[in-house]
Image (tube, rainbow, N blue to C red):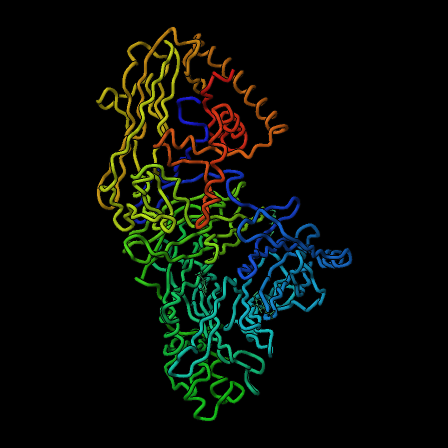
Amino acid sequence: MHPLLPLCVFWLLPLAWMLEKDSRLAYPRRSVPYHKDNCHRFHEEGVFNYSTMLLREDVDLLLLGAREAVYALDLNDISKKLASVKWEVTQKQKYECKNKGKDPETECKNYIRILHQTADNKTYVCGTNAFDPECDYMSYADGKLTLEKKREDGKGKCPFDPFQRYASIMVENNLYSATSINFLGSEPVLMRSSPTSVRTEFKSSWLHEPNFVSMAQMPESYMSKEGDDDKVYLFFSETAVECDCYNKLVVSRVARVCKGDLGGQRTLQKKWTSFLKARIDCPGLESKLPYLIQDTYRLCDPLRQWKDCLFYAIFKPQSETSDLSAVCAYRVSDISRVFAEGKYKTSVPVETSFDKWVMYSGDVPVPRPGACIDNVARKAGITQTLDLPDRTLQFIKDRPLMDQAIQPIGGKPLLIRRGATFTRIVVNQVQAADGEQYSVMFIGTERGTILKAANHDGEMFIIEEVQLFEPPEPIKILKFSNVTGQLYAGSDYGAAQIPLATCRRSSSCMDCVLARDPYCGWDTVDRKCVFLSDSPRGLIQSVKAGDASLCPDADVKSMNLTIWPQGNQKLHCSSPSNLAKTSWERDGRPLTPSTRLQVLEDGLLILNATDSDAGWYRCLSVEHSRATMYTTTVADYWVSVDPAGSKDTRATIVEARVDGPSVGGLQAAVAFLVVSLLALLTWNFYKGHLPLPWTCTKKNVEQYPESHGQVGLDTCQEAARSAPAEDKPLVAGANNGRDNHLLEENDVPNALLPSLQYIDDESEI
Ligand SMILES: *[C@@H]1O[C@H](CO)[C@@H](O)[C@H](O)[C@H]1NC(C)=O
Ligand SMILES: *[C@@H]1O[C@H](CO)[C@@H](O)[C@H](O)[C@H]1NC(C)=O
Ligand SMILES: *[C@@H]1O[C@H](CO)[C@@H](O)[C@H](O)[C@H]1NC(C)=O
């Protein structure tokens, strides 16, 4: 064991925002780098595009759709593959696809795009099938996945083009889908395939170059006084027909249809009579161009009625000059009111060749165009949409767009962030120690990270950002299971499973409380940051205020260091949080940096040591929380300078920044090379012959209680509700120091290259 902070410790520099910090934006308090093998992941050699998922909580399965394959994985540990089935395109299909001008290696493959559970517990599965979409039924029995080879036409259900966005949902065994229905991708539809097929009109006032995003259903018939019908909502962006501008303008939309819609009798035959859409805004961002919706999550409290459900939506900028992303939340009741009571837009021809869209102020026919069949309609003898009068149908055929736009709760975003574009969102509601419910947002980004964020009475707070995938590929799908309490994410390169919280990333009370994570609290008896529901005791937690004043004083163990004269030494001190600032004290007074005493991001560098460098060094971190400022000791060193200590020294060789060809520098270089060589050898040896389940160990954390912020070890470990998983990475920690070294050095080639500025243990030589 060496006395310095372990190699596992690694700090992502929050560089970009260090330079320019804007108070209207949110910054992650903690950045957790990627770490191989530390959470359940799934990837199969040679298979890509893991972007479709179906959670089968009833049978503990995660069905994962990729390119030309579907996998059945253990829902509790997705690294366990239970079964798989291939669905490849034939040579003939590939040839035909190629002849139509598509790329044989990418576009002419079968991308699984739809996985939905059917009433008989099978799975409905569709794939792009070399630009010729097809659907099939799949069953899982006796540990085998089987495709029935029913070969149903997938047009209008599944996109032809694997790069095109689409949306679909299965409601009472009927598939609702939003995609292009033709090869060219020029005929977008929102369609229900059964029991009778109903779709949108091919009119630009209905759908105009749309980018479909997501769908959700809402049980609006439940205890409805008006005898209303259930609805299916669709979120998308499209070119605005209503804009009288010269340039193309894209806007975000929400549309909805009624579940009982069968189309009209003469007008709108087999077309929706209830298709209504409205603009959906997420205002208050820097650009004049509207932001574009990317994904939504429906959050419903099971104890409350549907009107209280919320839609959380993420937005990205339309212009390439901005790199802000945002989350806005909408009340379903607000959306529903605009459709039920709002004014319509109508087009009026103007002298120039285009139409102008204005608010319609004339008479509105009865029944109200676009409304579901309700009690009033039934009283008038209209029991299904086939009975609707032509006047109502003609009206809606020409005017599916509402005049009013939907505004978010509070009129502004819940979260704004600069940096990697948001791609997917899941929201979870949790009861914290104070008895209050908190909504925690989990947001996937284009750079393979998941942000965990909350908004407390208008204050945006990003608890952490976890790097899930390496290379940093976009998160293409994000799902949450309330049965396992786990999140499941997919990217082009693989899938990963993470718990809602990994509390033990905080190893001090201060850090645990200032993290303001509603899932975690500090257990003063066990002296650990633990998952709320795992603890029998009352915990210290302060989600709203970030008040750490109840925390007992942290006791940081002093470390004794001996350096040889002219040697170089790095005293490690990583800030526990991106929101904290560290500073150094020497012998109880603020330290003055010099050319030989350099303060770095993650420590203090003593170069070319002399006797005068001996003393007591302390690293403090100051973090501003909502409540107040908190100062805590992160590291504490007693440094002595001793020529005799040079043989057995712990001295560190730093990046070759020593001026001139000094003896120290030469020694340093030689030692560095030798250590590197040994590390490489050890690694190879270990790789080949010692297949230990390595981890960065808990030991490290225990020994350096304040070394948390950057705990590379647990990117996604810690089971939310299962204790065994939490113990798993700790096994190696019980080994002796020797193993520990092996583990750490093994760690080096994979994860730590960027921080490999020093090798700190010559005792290995
Ligand atoms: C599928 O994955 C490959 C490999 O990462 C990527 O290059 C390609 O763009 C992906 N295709 C789609 C349709 O997402
Ligand atoms: C589907 O599975 C559930 C739970 O496994 C079971 O209760 C139900 O009877 C099954 N339904 C059919 C039609 O097999
Ligand atoms: C999970 O969610 C479903 C639907 O939202 C609900 O019916 C079920 O009770 C929830 N299960 C748990 C364990 O919370």
Percent coordinates x, y for residue 709 in the rendering = 37, 36
Q: Quadrant of residue 406?
A: bottom left
On screen, residue 410 above or below 570: below
On screen, residue 239 above or below 422: below
Which sits in the foreground, 441 or 302?
302
Q: Quadrant of residue 169?
A: bottom right
Q: How many numbered dots are placed on residues in this image?
A: 0
Percent coordinates x, y for residue 176 in the rendering = 55, 70
Which sits in the foreground, 233 or 365?
233
On screen, residue 221 above or below 329: below
Residue 108 as seen in the image, left or right of residue 517 = right
Q: Quadrant of residue 631?
A: top left
Percent coordinates x, y for residue 192 in the rendering = 57, 73
Dividing the image into four equal quarters, which quarter contains ligand 2?
A: bottom right
Percent coordinates x, y for residue 162 in the rendering = 61, 57
Q: Residue at x 47, y 59 (%)?
A: 295
Residue 28 as seen in the image, left or right of residue 233 = left
On screen, residue 615 above or below 33: above
